[in-house]
Amino acid sequence: MTNFLATKAMFDLPEGKIYLDGNSLGAFPKAATKRMTQTLEQEWGELLITGWNKAGWMEQPTKIGDRIAKLIGAETGHVVMGDTLSIKVYQALASALEMRPDRKIILSDNGNFPTDLYMAEGLIHSLGLQHQLKTVDPTDVVNHITDDVAVVMLTQVDYRTGRLHDMKAITKQAHDAGALVIWDLAHSAGALPVHVAACNADFAVGCTYKYLNGGPGAPAFIYVAPRHADTVRPALSGWLGHAAPFAFDLNYTAGNGIERMRVGTPPILQLAALESALDVWDMADINDVRAKSIELTNRFIAGVEAACPMLALASPRDGKMRGSQVSFKFEHGYAAIQALIARGVIGDFRAPDIMRFGFTPLYIDENDVDRAIAIIADVMQNSLWNRDEYKTQSRVT
Ligand SMILES: *Cc1c(COP(=O)(O)O)cnc(C)c1O
């Protein structure tokens, strides 16, 4: 059984704040300071360029990829770190489309995070092969998996509502129709048990600064199923995905398996922070995290609904059907979130009217949930959000 008091003690949380936004940017693991300082002073400072060999920097993307693999049910040796999630979406989609040259449809849903859709649009334009991005309602995806679909590209947990797709069933249905499947695990990795191999996913991608606490700008990951790993063509054929980067050959030869999904120089400082964040998982079982997350979110929904009839639940009521977040609809959601932040409850706002709260059992407990409910009740019942200072939108909402 995971000791959540012990995991909470591994994070540096600001006094007086209840942090319900770990779904956007995970909290700060205390060990990151020591680990990063070591990388800065003993590795970069003393080893300089020899750090690539002596400190194992070059292996970090696959070594940390193996730790991510455990959390998402992937085979060892088939996950690699690097770049941002937007880039990894592009890579997965480009490779997948090439594997289905006779099909033109990319199927996604309108609850997908826009960058995934934007990357698809950009890729379609660059390819110039008349591909078409089709976005349907999340509940309607299963009705559009037809035999002209090349790739089904979905995010397992809807970033606004927290609604979960059935990864296994959709993957099977897509394969039966001859399509490939890319799963974006941005709001899944570290939030709930995921089984990419058991689900037969073709590709999976995700970020590490949300539920994996790797810090702002932490690198993304990509998984390619072993059955495709040695045949997919990497669209972003950078030198570090080459079979022999230091042969400085003028022509590109793809590296072994997942190595080919590397692009350029890995972000060693960010990887150091991420590595220390992943140490928390040596003490935590993702099944315990999931069970606790359902408990906390149920408790939050019950408390907020009892106190705030003006908020409409936008997340599935059944805990098994939602990720680790709870969203409410409220017309003045932006101002309400600002008023909450001013009172120490940190959630976020997603246009047009969603107030979103993330739950991370590694460092959020029942007491935090109860305190948050009391503050939300005060803000909503007394319309404390209705002040000009809460209505000016910042760049990041
Ligand atoms: C958070 C998130 C992203 C962010 O992409 P970056 O390139 O890391 O900024 C992309 N896709 C989904 C589904 C997300 O939830």
Image (tube, grey):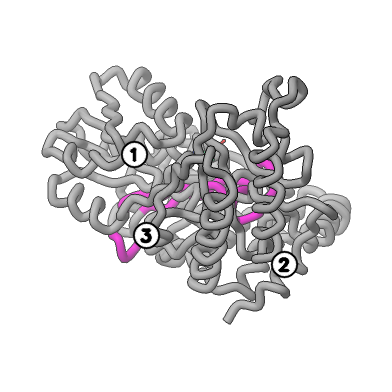
Count of marks overlaid on the render: 3
Which of disc 2 and disc 1 is earlier in sequence? 2
What SS does tag 3 mark?
Answer: loop
Looking at numbered disc 3 in the image, what kind of residue is underneath it?
Answer: Val
Q: Is residue 191 above or below residue 395?
A: below
Q: In the image, is residue 361 part of the stretch drawn in magenta?
A: no
User: 318 or 13, which lies in front?
Assistant: 318
Q: Quadrant of residue 355?
A: top right
In magenta, the rendered stretch is 197-224
Distance of label 2 from label 3 (alpha carbons): 28 Å
> In terms of secondary structure, what is the magenta stretch mainly?
loop
Looking at numbered disc 2 in the image, what kind of residue is underneath it?
Answer: Lys
User: 251 or 388, which lies in front?
Assistant: 388
Q: Are marks 3 and 1 in contact (CB under 8 Å)?
A: no
Residue 95 is labelled as: 1
For image coordinates 45% across by 35% down, the residue present is 113
The nearer-to-camera label among 1 and 2 is 2
**Residue 170 as seen in the image, left or right of residue 124:** left
Q: Quadrant of residue 252?
A: top left
**Residue 355 as seen in the image, left or right of residue 114:** right
The nearer-to-camera label among 3 and 1 is 3
Query: To which residue does mark 2 refer?
Result: 8
User: How far across and down, in percent of the image, does residue 7 sit?
Assistant: 69, 70
Q: Residues within 10 Å of mark 3 (few under 14, many from 20)?
A: many
User: How far across and down, in percent of the image, does residue 48 sit?
Assistant: 82, 49
Looking at numbered disc 1 in the image, what kind of residue is underneath it?
Answer: Ser
Query: To which residue does mark 3 refer?
Result: 196
Distance of label 1 from label 2 (alpha carbons): 40 Å
Q: Is residue 235 visible?
A: yes
Q: Is residue 271 visible?
A: no
